[in-house]
Image: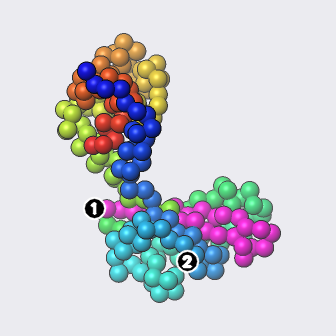
Amino acid sequence: MEAPLDPTHDLRGIADLREGPGLLILSTDNRLLHMNRRGWELVREIGEAQVIKAAGLLPNAVSEICAEIHTLLKAQVGSKDWEQLEVRRLVGDSKRPVLFRGFGLPGSEAAQHSRILIVMEVMGRRERVAQQVQKRFHLTNREQTVVQTLAKGLTNKEIATALGITEPTVKAHIKHIMEKTKCTTRTGIIAQVLQG
């Protein structure tokens, strides 16, 4: 019989496994104010061919996002508009594309105190992890789908509705998943899967 899981321990383990996004913070005149370690790694991965000196050796996508945010904000008035604004660019090659998402962060009344936040995330990682988990635990396609809905925090009834199956069928799938992952709780399943 499996020992009860410590939810705090599970959450720390899950957090440690995630690569996390790259973060850039720029001034409104495109000066780099901050970049986290993951940001440096992703910028380096994108390659020398896509960098420009004007943006402090950052990919062209950064300058493009900043320019588009500036253009959009000139047409809008008020700090509430900043909160609704998001600009996206896909950068890198097809094997490891990186999604750049730019956001305007309002400063004080003067525009020079505003900032631009760019979040960089590697695309496709979730799909690769899902495939690895399915293979590792010998899950059927339907069981894999149920695991994905469990990870979203859905109840059995919500899973049944989302997948167009009955609630007893969902319970049967969860029972099989517990057997295959050697877990006795839904939280245990999610913890096992996220370790995959």
Report whether residue 55 is seen: yes
| Element type at mark 1 | loop
Colouring scheme applied when the structure was drawn: rainbow
Q: Quadrant of residue 182?
A: top left
Q: Is residue 163 above or below residue 39?
A: above
Mark 1: which amino acid?
Lys
Q: Position of residue 79 (x, y in %)?
A: 75, 61
Q: Position of residue 65 (x, y in %)?
A: 55, 70
Q: Is residue 73 left or right of residue 49?
A: right
Q: Position of residue 195 (x, y in %)?
A: 30, 43
- Span shown in magenta: 96-118
Asked if the residues shown at circle 2 and circle 1 are in contact, with their CB atoms under 8 angstroms apart, the answer is no
Q: Residue at x 28, y 25 (%)?
A: 2
Q: Is residue 105 magenta?
A: yes
Q: Position of residue 176 (x, y in %)?
A: 26, 21
Q: Residue at x 39, y 68 (%)?
A: 42
- Numbered tag placed on residue 147 in the rendering: none
Q: Nearer the viewer, residue 132 or 72?
A: 132
Q: Is residue 143 magenta?
A: no
Q: Which residue is mark 2?
A: 32
Q: Is residue 131 above or below residue 147?
A: below
Q: Quadrant of residue 135?
A: top left
Q: Residue at x 21, y 33 (%)?
A: 137
Q: CA distance from mark 2 to mark 1?
A: 28 Å
Q: Which residue is mark 1?
A: 95
Quadrant of the drawing holding the C terminus:
top left
Q: Nearer the viewer, residue 193 or 114?
A: 193
| Element type at mark 2 | strand
Mark 2: which amino acid?
Leu
